Image: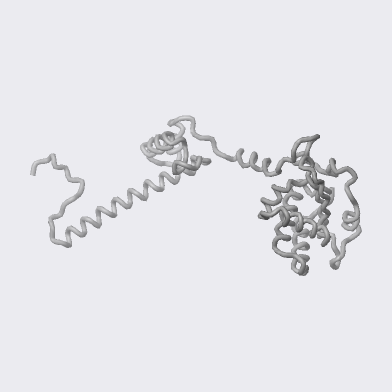
Amino acid sequence: MAEVNYIKHLNAVFSQFSKDSRLNPTHISLYLAFFQIWNYNRFCDGFHVNREEVMRLSKIGSKSTYHRCTKELHHYKYLIYEPSHNPFKGSVIKMLIFSSRVNGNLTKQSQSNLESTIPNARQVVGQPLDLSVPNQGQALVPFNKQYKQIENSYKLELPKNELEVIAFFKKIKAPELEAQKFYNHYQANGWKIGGKIKMEDWHASAKNWILKAAELKTEKQQSQIRDNHRSTESGNLHTIRNKNYDHPL
């Protein structure tokens, strides 16, 4: 496994990009997609790639553009590309270490990477994690599935009952009545924001609910003050909207 300094490598490769007139934005986007996967695999010597996944990361919509730019990056000596033409195996990418370049030339370590090849395309040399490498006939798994599992682990579980919501509202010193309204509202619509988006953090939604309730209360009070002010200026009798007509005159 190569020792790569993340910052130094990117600084060096960006400097090289600015000097290379052969490149266009698609080349750079594709290279950064490969670099992201390389970083995810802890800068191993070589790694398999899923074409659809790389196209999604690099925002490339054409397969021909993807293959052309990958071959050109290989030809321009930014990486080593070994196509497999096998959907169960995936092509192999070996990234060159730009932070080891001196005066624009590759050092011995990087030059050896350029001249070397992977003897067995079914095996990724020096790969520490077996997350995106195919296994005896299995299709190549996009590496972002592991990210989705991590993201799901941070989602806050929905409240088990109304008491849990009331306890949270009391903790943040909010009215119990608002807690009941909040719970009944979202319990009725399946805990979906706007009736469409599934709620991921009900604590944050509850705080927004309280802020919205306070805003509505303030707007109502200001509206009553404006109405009373207009009534006074027009010379009409001073009246209020919430008058109880059950009382005798």
Seen at 43% across and 31% down, the residue is 162
Seen at 70% across and 43% down, the residue is 142
On screen, residue 206 versus residue 82, left or right, reads left
Seen at 47% across and 39% down, the residue is 192
In front here: 176 or 14?
14
Q: Residue 9's spot in the image, x, y percent?
A: 78, 58
Seen at 42% across and 44% down, the residue is 209
On screen, residue 160 versus residue 9, left or right, reads left
In front here: 82 or 115?
82
Whether residue 32 is situated above or below residue 140 in the rendered picture? below
Label total for image: 0
Whether residue 103 is situated above or below residue 189 in the rendered picture? below
What colouring does the structure picture have? one colour
Q: Residue 217's spot in the image, x, y percent?
A: 33, 48
Quarter of the image where one finds residue 195 = top left
On screen, residue 86 versus residue 145, left or right, reads right
Q: Residue 18's spot in the image, x, y percent?
A: 74, 68
Q: Residue 245's spot in the image, x, y percent?
A: 14, 42
In front here: 157 or 104?
104
Extreme residue in the front direction? 64
On screen, residue 228 versus residue 203, left or right, reads left
In front here: 131 or 27?
27
